[in-house]
Image (cartoon, helix red, strand yellow):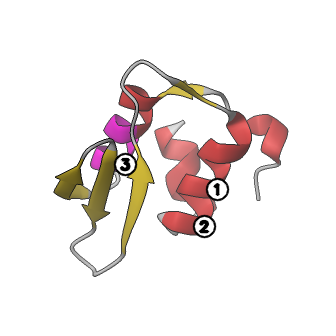
Amino acid sequence: MLTPTKFPSLKADELLSMLTKAGFRQEQRKGSHRMLKHPDGRSFTFAFHRGATVRPAIVRHILVKEAGLSDDEISRLL
């Protein structure tokens, strides 16, 4: 598994783009919150602030815990 130091900080737009490439689609938007859903049923909501920088620990949390991406999927996206 990647260590937290291996995860880069990303702009919110970049993170959303990565999640889209991983198969997630925006299902709902309410204010700054985006609900993303994968065709296999995985879904989660995250706070999207255009132009904001997302810290590496949060990038890791979203990709690993929320989106449930495998190490291989994350490596391909990063």
Q: What residue sits 60% from the left and 61% below the top?
A: 64
Q: Which residue is mark 2?
A: 65
Q: Quadrant of the C terminus?
A: top right
Tell me: residue 15, above or below residue 21.
above
**Percent of width and height locating residue 40:** 27, 80
Please, what is the three-letter code of the amino acid marked with disc 3? Answer: Leu
Give the label on residue 70, or none.
none
Label 2: how many residues lie within 10 Å, few (<14), some (14-19) or many (20+)?
few
Asked if residue 17 lies in the magenta stretch, the reply is yes
Span shown in magenta: 16-21
Q: Which residue is mark 1?
A: 61
Label 1 or label 3, whichever comes before in sequence order: 3
Name the secondary structure under disc 2.
helix
Which residue ends up furthest to the top in the rendered image? 51
**Percent of width and height locating residue 47:** 43, 46
Label 2 or label 3, whichever comes before in sequence order: 3
47 lies left or right of 8: left
Asked if residue 43 lies in the magenta stretch, the reply is no
Q: Which residue is mark 3?
A: 19
Whether tag 1 and tag 2 are in contact, CB under 8 A, the answer is yes
The secondary structure that dominates the magenta segment is helix
Give the distance between the C-alpha atoms of the residues marked 1 and 2, in whole angstroms: 5 Å
Q: Quadrant of the N terminus?
A: bottom right
Name the secondary structure under disc 3.
helix
